[in-house]
Amino acid sequence: MSITVYVPCDSGAISLGADRVATAIARQAQQRGIAIDLIRNGSRGMYWLEPMVEVVTEAGRIAYGPVQSTDVEELFNADFLHGGVHKLALGLTEELDYLKKQQRLTFARAGKTDPVSLDDYVAHDGYQGLKNALAMPPADIVKAVTDSGLRGRGGAAFPTGIKWNTVLNTPSDQKYIVCNADEGDSGTFSDRMIMEGDPFVLVEGMTIAGLAVGATRGYIYLRVEYPHAHKALNTAIDKAYQAGYLGDNILGDGRSFHLEVRLGAGAYVCGEETSLMESLEGKRGLVRFKPPLPAIKGLFGQPTVVNNVISLASVPIILDKGGDYYRDFGMGRSRGTLPLQLAGNIKHAGLVELAFGLTLRELLYDFGGGSASGKPIKAVQVGGPLGAYLPESQFDTPLDYEAFAAVWAVLGHGGVVAFDDSVDMAAMAKYSMEFCAIESCGKCTPCRIGSTRGYEVMDDIMQGRDLDKNIALLRSLCDTLLNGSLCALGGMTPYPVLSALNHFPEDFGLSPVANEKANAA
């Protein structure tokens, strides 16, 4: 009887040597005449332990990591295939503290299954949500999503059910479902992980969305830098068609939904929904004026649902377990769970899925283990390159959309990037302006010109030139960007710039007292 061994096919694990480890395990097993079933699974999200190898034993799946190809012969000698003792042994995977304390709903299967095995997916409750949806009127599907409290996980946090209801009630012969998989925020990787580690859950979520609003065609707009996700998605889509989960007659019900992947060309601004649709239509990725909203006049001028990967991947469990089940997680108006991504100067970088309400401090230290350098964590940027920098005094803020808004910060896509006390926050503010200047689509003046002037002013500030005058000018530019930009790229660039200035004035050559007076003025 063969022994089952799991080695991740996740691109993060591959970059750390997972393919070499898989090859070495297969070679050793062959040389020793041992029958193994080598499965390439998704990552569990504990990247400091990657490549993490798991072996199925009578006691459960036992993990070893981080494993390099040079460790494989020694692991075989230690009888790791039967849970043998070794310095890389971590114990039962499900009992690892980092995983055990999580509440995985969207990522329930990630790391447990072969990502592109439809049989594996169905055996782990896959497609239960779609089967339930097929037995419901469209309005009831929308109501379940509305009742769940699910809000857009891409950053805007707009209630998903309201968006779907608008598309449902907008008459049209053709409607679309568009998945925004252009994950471009620094420190974010949850979209990639779900697409590489459980692609069927996204396919199922988009199919349910199609049934809910009467859309018969969907597109996944995928960033070109994700070749492994591209391959996994196309494989999953092909298998879904073959098994009748996609096509003109879904599971014999008579309704249809067709799905395909389209690659973006690397523009950050195409993560904005209207720019994304322009790109999908074969045009230059320029932001559209709103209204009309995409839900009324979107892709090719038709009613369109545009949702983030995690939003759509959360739909199957809502239709499987019910809206009330999902809503029971979280706090306030932030319901369900959020896959948080720990990156930067952090000891235990990885993915943490938990209900809203955990504090930033708990995330950084109970899960992240503090900084990788051992120095104090000085600042944390949450929500990507347009997110605010939070100082240590705000680390007790609960991870909740409204709680973050109250301290002039955003949760965004859930990316959390930590910096220790060696960071120069003025340099980070300058980078934010530079990022905006480079990535601006150029359609609106505040973003196109304001960011360029902001970068120049930050250079003067860092050189110590005319601080009083240039700090005032920087604040004025931020006010223009905040209130005059056409989309969130220019409109949110002031978040990192002003938060760095307000919380870390000493890095700008200011005394805290002088900065408080300037801020008040």
Image: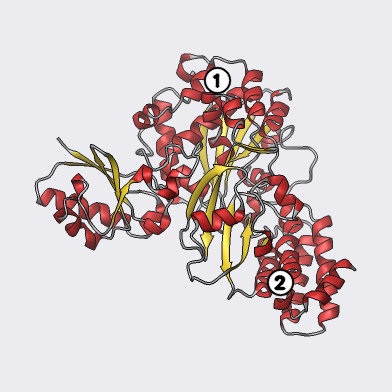
Locate residue 360: give its quadrant. Answer: bottom right
Q: Amino acid at mark 1?
A: Ala
The number of discs equals: 2
Query: Can residue 309 be seen in the rendering of this structure?
Result: no
Query: Can residue 82 be seen in the rendering of this structure?
Result: yes
Disc on the earlier residue, 1 or 2: 1
Q: Nearer the viewer, residue 104 or 312?
A: 104
| Residue 472 rendering spot, x and y as whole percentages | 85, 73
Label annotation for residue 504: 2
How was the colour assigned to the protein in this rendering?
secondary structure
Label 1 packing within 10 angstroms: few (<14), some (14-19), many (20+): many
Label annotation for residue 195: none
| Residue 243 rendering spot, x and y as whole percentages | 39, 24
Q: Which residue is mark 1?
A: 133
CB atoms of marks 1 and 2 within 8 Å: no
How far apart in space, not on screen, are marks 1 and 2 (Cα)?
51 Å
Note whether 135 is above or below 301 in the view shown: above
Q: Nearer the viewer, mark 1 or mark 2?
A: 2
Left/right placement of residue 443 relative to residue 177 reads right
Label 2 packing within 10 angstroms: few (<14), some (14-19), many (20+): many
| Residue 427 rendering spot, x and y as whole percentages | 66, 74
Q: Hey, which residue is sitting farthest right in the picture? A: 521
Note whether 63 is above or below 216 in the view shown: below
Q: Residue at x 76, y 68 (%)?
A: 502
Badge 1 marks a residue whose secondary structure is: helix
| Residue 467 rendering spot, x and y as whole percentages | 81, 81
Locate residue 3: give its quadrant. Answer: top left
The N terminus sits in image quarter: top left
Badge 2 marks a residue whose secondary structure is: loop
Left/right placement of residue 279 relative to residue 231 reads right
